[in-house]
Amino acid sequence: MTDQFTRTRLLLGEEAFHALQQAHVAIVGCGAVGSFAAEALARAGVGQLTLIDGDTVEESNINRQLFAVHSSLGQPKTEAARQRLHDINPNLNISSNNFFLDDKTCASLLEKRPDFVLDAIDTLAAKEALILYLLAEKIPFAASMGAALRTDPSHVQEVLFHQTKVCPLAAHLRKNLRKKLGKVPSFPVVYSDEPPKKASFQSRQLGSLITLTGVFGLRLAHIALRFLTEQSEGDQNGHF
């Protein structure tokens, strides 16, 4: 007998899959990067997701965000995400939080202490607040750096934060964290070493393509899957 997770179990083994079923991952930011990360985790078999985003679905999101479709316009992104992810896995335990994360809301939004956190925030202040909180609480996490204004997915890679270069978001974050911590912390990130294209100053929005943001989100999810399956003891197939 097969079910929707048969292929996952065949690849990773039963112990690693059981670890995924028992795992709790929080995704902060359910937009271009976060939507792909959240859906990948749901399809892989992660048992519990906490979704955090205070934004609503807009028509301009449709070009790159999985939860953005015409029927979800105007909905909170976390609600659109909850509906789609429950359609993928009706047994998935989802906590959806229609709030923007900042230094005052970190503790309450993450009070259930997830096993792993994926930072898919695209604003510097909120990203900095989240990372400082996770470091202080010793909660494992991975973060996405800037995905907009890039066109070549072959430049997207996973490195440690201090190894990033070219990315303006990473540079600003590195400077701010060094000021507050006295050093540059080490944690896994997904980023592109492709120099960003010049932004149009006619709009506050930055151009982006699903072929780039999707790669960011999937690679971010893969870091979480790798971490969670490596926690399973005695598994011989789940390490990847």
Image (cartoon, rainbow, N blue to C red):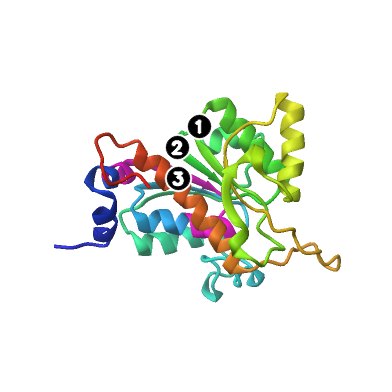
Sequence-wise, the earlier of marks 1 and 3 is: 1
Q: Which residue is mark 2?
A: 114
Q: Residues within 10 Å of mark 1 (few under 14, many from 20)?
A: some
Distance of label 3 from label 2 (alpha carbons): 11 Å
| Residue 33 on the magenta segment | yes
**Residue at the right extreme of this rendering:** 201
Q: Residue at x 46, y 33 (%)?
A: 113
Q: Are marks 2 and 1 in contact (CB under 8 Å)?
A: yes
The secondary structure type at the circle numbered 3 is helix
Sequence-wise, the earlier of marks 3 and 2 is: 2
Q: Which residues are magenta?
A: 18-37
| Residue 131 on the magenta segment | no
Q: Which residue is mark 1?
A: 139
Residue 66, given in percent of the width and then of the height, sits at 52, 66
Three-letter amino acid code at the position of disc 3: Ala
The secondary structure type at the circle numbered 2 is loop
Residue 167, given in percent of the width and then of the height, sits at 72, 50
Q: Which residue is mark 3?
A: 224
Q: Residues within 10 Å of mark 3 (few under 14, many from 20)?
A: many
